[in-house]
Amino acid sequence: MTLHAVAESGLPGYPWLVFLHGFAGGSHEWRTVGQAFGAYPRLYIDLPGHGGSAHIAVNDFADVSELIKNTLNSYNILKYWLVGYSLGGRVAMFYVSQPREGLCGLVVEGGHPGLTDENQRLWRRHNDAAWAERFRHEPLTQVFADWYQQPVFASLNAAQRATLVALRSRNNGGALAAMLQTSSLAEQPDLRASLRAREFSFHYLCGERDGKFRAIADELSATTHVINHAGHNAHRENPDAVVACLAQFLAS
C-alpha cells in the first residue's frame, strides 16, 4: 500500500524534495515553498488520515514509515531530502532513525524529538484522547477554533487563526482523531539518540516567536535556522524566508 501524493517534475540529476505536512494539513501544505525549487523534482505526501490518504489507518509510527518507504519506491525516488513540519517532522525523524538508502538530508520545522518523562507521556496520551473525542463528535469548525487557541499557536492573529480553522475543517474528523492518537507524542519514542548518531545533514527550522520549539532546537545536534517574523507555522507565515533558508543549504 502507498500514500496519496502529488508529484512535480524537475531537472535530471537533482535530488527529490519530499514534503510531509503537519496535523490536519495535506499535500498542499508545502506547495508555496516547494514550487520555488523548480529544478528539483518534488513529492508532497498526504499522511494517513489526511487528504487523499484519509481512508488509510495505521497502528503506529512503524506503519507510517513503511507506507512512506513504499510511496518513495513507487515513484522510483533514489536520492532525496526529507522535509517535515510538526507532525510531519516527527514522522520524518522516526523514518530516518533506520538507515535509509538515498537520503541526502533531513529538514524539520517545529517537530518534537520525543518525550523523556513518563508523567508527560501519560498527560499527553490523556490530552490527545480528549481532543480525539472532540474531533469524532463535534463540528470541526468548533474544535479547530479551540485547537488554535493552544499556547503553541499564540503568535497567530485573528485573521490567520480564522483562515486555518476554515482550511483544517475540510478534513474528516474520525480519520483525524485516529491519526492524532496513533501519532501522539505519547506513542513516539525519544529520537534524540538516533538523531545524534546520524550520518546525514540535519537542519532544524523554527519561528522566532515559537519559544517552545526554539528551546527544543537547542537539545538537538542539528544546524538550527530561526525564521524571522514567524511562530509555529513558519513556512506559512514567512514562506520567502523558509525558501531562502532551504536554498542556502541545498546549494552547499
Image (spheres, rainbow, N blue to C red):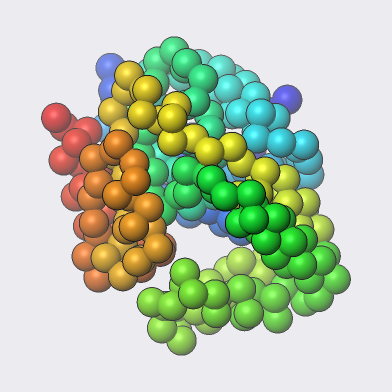
Q: Is residue 114 above or below residue 95?
A: below
Residue 56, given in percent of the width and then of the height, sits at: 76, 40
Question: Can the viewer see residue 243?
Answer: no
Residue 4, given in percent of the width and then of the height, sits at: 64, 37
Residue 165, given in percent of the width and then of the height, sits at: 59, 75
The C terminus sits in image quarter: top left
Q: Quadrant of residue 226?
A: bottom left
The front one of 106 and 125 is 125
* Residue at 20%, 41% in the rendered image: 247
Residue 169, given in percent of the width and then of the height, sits at: 66, 70
The N terminus sits in image quarter: top right
Question: Can the viewer see residue 46?
Answer: yes
**Is 211 on the left-hand or right-hand side of 87?**
left
Q: Quadrant of residue 40?
A: top left
**Is 234 on the left-hand or right-hand side of 39?**
right
The front one of 210 and 135 is 210
* Residue at 61%, 28% in the rendered image: 65
* Residue at 61%, 56% in the rendered image: 120
